[in-house]
Image (cartoon, rainbow, N blue to C red):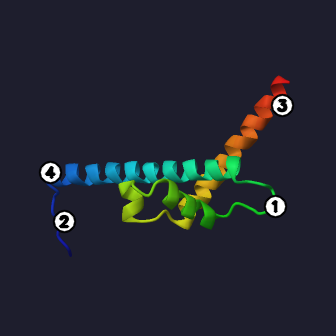
Amino acid sequence: MTTVTKRTPEEIRDARNARRRAKRLADTRLALARHAASYLLHWENDGTRPITTRKVIDQTRYMHFNHREIQRQAITTDEAQTALDAVRQAIRDEDARRAHRV
């Protein structure tokens, strides 16, 4: 039988702060990727070639090369895909809103 040691209040606080910091950094990384995806879809999309997650990763690195999170580690393919999907959905929503107004 194993014994369970009770965590100290400091350990509980440190764990909670680590979870909050990780969430904040993930939100920051996703926001940077969304910015790059938005740029690609609005300005670099000529309709002949699809915007891929690789392009989003490269554009994020190019646009935000000074950001400490991007210097620490490039965004992942999953983050790039999530950002691309979010921007595409926002564009569809805006197009639907415009069509409804006209």
**Residue at the location (50% across, 48% down)?**
31
In-image side of 38 versus 94 (left or right): left
- Report which residue position mark 3 lands on: 99
Task: For marks 1 and 3, give the one nearer the viewer.
Answer: 1
The quarter of the picture where residue 70 lies is bottom left
Q: Which residue is mark 2?
A: 4
Along the polypeptide, which appears first: circle 2 or circle 4?
2
Residue 77 on image: x %, y %: 56, 66
Q: CA distance from mark 2 to mark 4?
A: 17 Å
Structural crowding at the residue carrying mark 2, measured as other residues with C-alpha within 10 Å and reported as few (<14), some (14–19) or many (≥20): few
Circle 4 packing at 10 Å, graded few (<14), some (14-19), many (20+), is few
Q: Quadrant of the C terminus?
A: top right
**Circle on res. 48:** 1
CA gap, disc 2 and disc 1: 61 Å
Kindly identify the residue that appears in the image at 54 percent across and 54 percent down. Answer: 33
Q: Secondary structure at mark 2?
A: loop
